[in-house]
Image (spheres, rainbow, N blue to C red):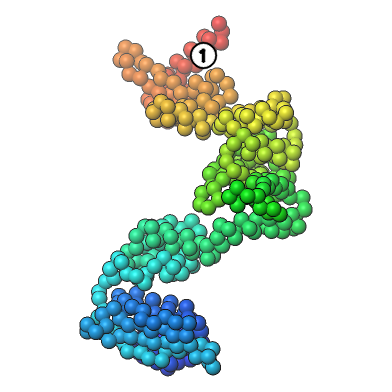
Amino acid sequence: MHAPEFPDYMSAKVPFVADGEFVVGMEFSFREAVIKAMNEYTLQRSVDYRVYESEPLTFYAKCTQYGSGCDWLIRVSMISRKHCWVIRRYNGSHTCTRATISQDHSKLDSNTIAEAIKPLVEADPSLKVKSVIAEVQSNFNYTVSYRKAWLAKQKSVEKIFGGWKASYKAFPIWFEAMCHKEPSAVVHFETMPAYQGDDLVTDIRVLHRVFWSYYPCIRAFRHCKPVVQVDGTHLYEKYMGCLLVAVSHDGNNNIVPIAFAIVEGETSDAWHFLLSNLRQHVVTRDDVGLISDRHESINAAVERSHEAWSPPRTFHMFCIRHIESNFLRKFKAPYLQKLVVNIGYSQTVRKQNEVFEVREMPSGVEYAVDLRHQRCDCGEFQVDQIPCRHTECIDSRYDAVDQS
């Protein structure tokens, strides 16, 4: 003997029930709790039921094998004087239990899975779909499709954190609360008219762009290196658009985010919106380096900035990581990829050419010498911690160049 399996759904105490079965007189606080309890019961026992009556005050179901060797049925009714749902009739338990659940089980839908994985999603919103599938397999002995697991995760995220519509609707409220708490924060909205078809909807504006920067970020930039890096990432799901981000680097080479913007896309107007607000509210000093992938829209926005992002106030530089990626895409030479990055980080011609190949004569054997990391294929440089003969060959060549 043990307690019923559905304590969360009961609003009154009932007698202990053997084997977790329902019992006549069991009470539930609302109709949805009845259906949820029945679905969990069905999945745990690898059975199924068919609804014969579903009315506002009555719910009546039978086993799908009713009349073919199984007499399981249940009738639950709303009792007005008790303000709860009560099991009025019950024939249990099932006599048609199967060992496994077929993959077309109608009761294990995405809503049921979403409810089961809520604690996991709340703890880790980036939970992978394959982890959802594993959790369902563990709890229900059932392997769901990737799509059903993905859909369940989306529903669970929406139940916990709210949907896209609710999130965007809360945007102005969230920013208003932020500015109320920290008046020195910067928020700049741009809106546009709303249309229904071709008709203008009066008294309604929709979000077009928004720029914001937290005051601690604004203050932090005053103590960062004079470098600003900008980039964007695409937003998906319902409203699309792009998230533009500006970051800097502190004295410990940590990345410091300093400004954000949600815009319609990586267009010239969108980048001009970010850069103009960034220059006005955050990057107010001159002699700053602006690093980007030099996308055409960014270059166009810089040209429109009325010299706010042009020399001598700002120096526009390439992002070495984008150069590396573009180089690899064009030349398909992974072995040169590291050299491209090293060249980008070098400050002098000498340092740019810090990896050399030295051929030893008359054997013709080639040795790679890395001056920065003090390594040579012969092994002597890194073991003895003094330049080997191949390194001295490079030094003598540079000495000859310097003297000439």
Image point (74%, 58%), residue name: 181
Question: Tag 1: Cα neighbours inside 10 Å, few (<14), some, or many (≥20)?
Answer: few
- From where the camera sits, is residue 124 visible? no
- Residue in front for this viewpoint, 321 or 250: 321
Question: How many numbered circles are shown?
Answer: 1
Q: Identify the image quadrant of residue 95.
A: bottom left
x then y, percent, for residue 262? 62, 46
Residue type (three-letter) at the residue carrying disc 1: Tyr
Kindly give the residue lying farthest to the left in the view shown.
69
- Quarter holding the N terminus is bottom left
State whether residue 313 is above or below residue 185.
Answer: above
x then y, percent, for residue 156? 48, 64
Q: Is residue 319 left or right of residue 62?
A: right
Kindly give the residue lying farthest to the right in the view shown.
183
Image point (54%, 89%), residue name: 83
State whether residue 298 is above or below residue 218.
Answer: above
Kindly give the residue lying farthest to the top in the view shown.
404
Residue under label 1: 398
Image point (69%, 58%), residue name: 173
